[in-house]
């Protein structure tokens, strides 16, 4: 009986990337003799978002296991994951509109449509809703819109879509009359959507470093698409976007949101409570409270050399935050930890109850692993069985075990190396057993790798292994995160999603 749903980026709001309900794929049968490419689901544009999945959905006159795919051509697809049959396809373009041009930036090319991973709530609306943010243009006007689509038909619900808009008190970049204004043409929604306690959280990055821009989190009710709260994290400065390199805002069980902010203004003058006097959090690891439906920075960490790092574009923004499960990790007391890494090559572990804030002479942080990912991280980590998995650029995938509450300084690592941007790993396991780490090489063709989670030196499978190119899956695409559900592995490319599984 299939039981897995993957409704959000990296499986859960902590962004651990672990699917612990995988009973089909094991270290024994994931090999080139019994496992390989089953089919490719062709679509109309680049797939920059992680595919999502619902098991046993009543749709199209039957019950299907469904994989949802979004493209930069502003399309949303639903496919039967077992047969490859297309169940529905819709365009999110308004009348007379096209997808956005690349906005003079080479990061999302040649068009910008749906970039971020959507989120699904199976228990809302008539049959369940998939929430998607799409960018488009009409001449000189640009639009960012939040859509709510019926998962069984793709039909718009909740009188949607709604235009993303926002203003926030401040005198920073693109401000007017004491308000910083959200300009849709200046932003991309790269980070995946977060659904937390009935609210959809969007977050925004720039096109390259093309000013003017600031850092935004804008929240909407999942029940009626009304805007509920706005936060700007550099309201009296500039830059400081939320990029996450394909990851998503993370959240903890206490209802707090975590993000890594990119290069931008940080106020080194602090108030009596240790917060920046003008509320500017460039290059910071931030904790955002959602109490009372209002977004507010509740705590943060920023390194002592943050101004130098931002000036040199060596910031945290290229990575994504991950919340570790509340656990003792061998210490005898419950720890609440989070991890993040970016361009400076260090892994930062924060105590979520006391993140460390800013000190010009020292980093007052729970744990710092200097040079642990020396080539810089452009992606996100994963977590499984007291182990954190990271891959830096043009480097190996590494596993940092947690003992006595701290990450090991000497990780195990793969023999394989991963070209830019490194790899964004995912985990499949059956509870705490049969752990497999999946990672994609951004090459042409792309390569899917599977490693034993307990020993990364043991490679179980590579899509390069089978003879005659049997498992070659298409051209690689940066920031691609493998999704695993019910015995299948889904891998996005520049024009498809490749489906891997046990061979017939």
Image (cartoon, rainbow, N blue to C red):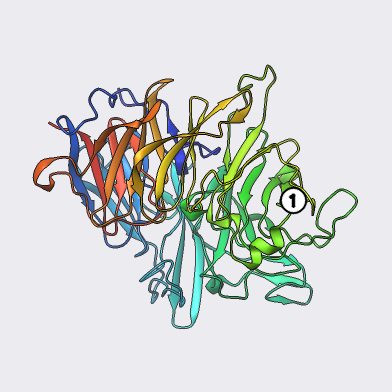
Left of 235 or right of it: where is 258?
Answer: left
Quarter that holds the N terminus: top left
Residue 163 horizontal/vertical position (percent):
55, 65
Q: Is residue 316 shown to the viewer in this render?
A: yes
Tell me which corner region of the image, top left, top right, bottom left or bottom right, holds residue 494: bottom left
Please give the name of the residue rendered at 51% of the width and 60% of the height, measured from the top-left corner.
189
User: Front-most of 295 and 434?
Assistant: 434
Left of 361 or right of it: where is 198?
Answer: left
Most extreme residue toward the left, as rendered?
468
Quarter that holds the C terminus: top left
Residue 173 horizontal/vertical position (percent):
69, 74
For label 1, the residue is 296
Most extreme residue toward the bottom, as rendered?
140
User: Front-most of 37 and 421?
Assistant: 421
Please give the name of the residue rendered at 37% of the width and 63% of the height, measured from the top-left corner.
74
Residue 164 horizontal/vertical position (percent):
57, 64
Disc 1 crowd rating (10 Å Cα; few below 14, some 14-19, many 20+) is some
Above or below 162: residue 28: above
Please give the name of the residue rendered at 38% of the width and 77% of the height, measured from the top-left corner.
96
User: Front-most of 14 and 121?
Assistant: 14
Residue 474 horizontal/vertical position (percent):
22, 54
> Element type at marker 1?
strand
């Amino acid at each position: 009986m299939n039981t897995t749903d993957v409704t959000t980026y990296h499986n859960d709001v902590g962004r651990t990337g672990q699917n612990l309900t995988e009973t089909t794929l094991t270290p024994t049968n994931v090999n080139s003799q019994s496992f390989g490419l089953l089919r490719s689901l062709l679509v109309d544009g680049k797939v920059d978002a992680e595919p999502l999945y619902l098991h046993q959905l009543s749709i199209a006159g039957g019950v299907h296991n469904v994989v949802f795919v979004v493209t930069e051509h502003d399309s949303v697809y639903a496919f039967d994951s077992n047969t490859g049959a297309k169940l529905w396809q819709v365009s999110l373009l308004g009348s007379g509109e096209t997808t956005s041009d690349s906005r003079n930036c080479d990061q999302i090319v040649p068009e910008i449509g749906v970039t971020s991973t959507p989120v699904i709530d199976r228990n809302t609306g008539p049959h369940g809703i998939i929430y998607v943010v799409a960018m488009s243009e009409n001449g000189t006007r640009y639009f960012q819109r939040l859509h709510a689509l019926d998962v069984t038909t793709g039909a718009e619900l909740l009188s949607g879509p709604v235009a993303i808009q926002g203003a926030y008190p401040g005198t920073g970049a693109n401000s007017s009359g004491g308000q910083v204004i959200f300009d849709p043409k200046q932003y991309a929604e790269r980070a995946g959507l977060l659904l937390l306690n009935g609210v959809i959280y969007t977050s925004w990055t720039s096109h390259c470093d093309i000013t003017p821009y600031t850092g935004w989190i804008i929240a909407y009710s999942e029940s009626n698409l009304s805007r509920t709260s706005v936060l700007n994290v550099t309201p009296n400065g500039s830059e400081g976007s939320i990029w996450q390199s394909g990851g998503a805002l993370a959240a903890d069980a206490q209802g707090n949101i975590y993000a890594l902010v990119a290069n931008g203004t940080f106020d080194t003058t602090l108030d009596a409570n240790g917060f920046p006097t003008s509320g500017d959090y460039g290059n910071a690891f931030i904790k955002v409270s959602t109490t009372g439906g209002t977004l507010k920075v509740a705590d943060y960490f920023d390194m002592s050399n943050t101004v130098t790092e931002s000036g040199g574009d060596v910031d945290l923004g290229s990575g994504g935050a991950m919340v570790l499960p509340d656990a003792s990790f061998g210490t005898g007391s419950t720890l609440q930890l989070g991890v993040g890494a970016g361009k400076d090559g260090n892994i930062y572990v924060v105590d979520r109850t006391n993140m460390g804030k800013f000190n010009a002479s020292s980093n007052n942080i729970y744990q710092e692993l200097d040079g642990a990912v020396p080539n810089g991280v452009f992606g996100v980590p994963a977590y499984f069985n007291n182990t954190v998995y990271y891959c830096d650029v043009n480097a190996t995938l590494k596993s940092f075990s947690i003992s006595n509450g701290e990450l090991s300084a000497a990780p195990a690592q793969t023999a394989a190396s991963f070209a830019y941007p490194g790899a964004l790993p995912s985990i499949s396991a059956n509870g705490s057993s049969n752990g497999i780490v999946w990672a994609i090489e951004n090459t042409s063709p792309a390569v899917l790798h599977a490693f034993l989670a307990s020993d990364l030196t043991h490679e179980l499978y590579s899509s390069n292994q089978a003879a005659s190119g049997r498992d070659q899956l298409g051209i690689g695409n940066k920031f691609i995160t493998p999704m695993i559900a019910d015995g299948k592995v889904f891998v996005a490319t520049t024009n498809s999603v490749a489906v891997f599984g046990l061979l017939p």
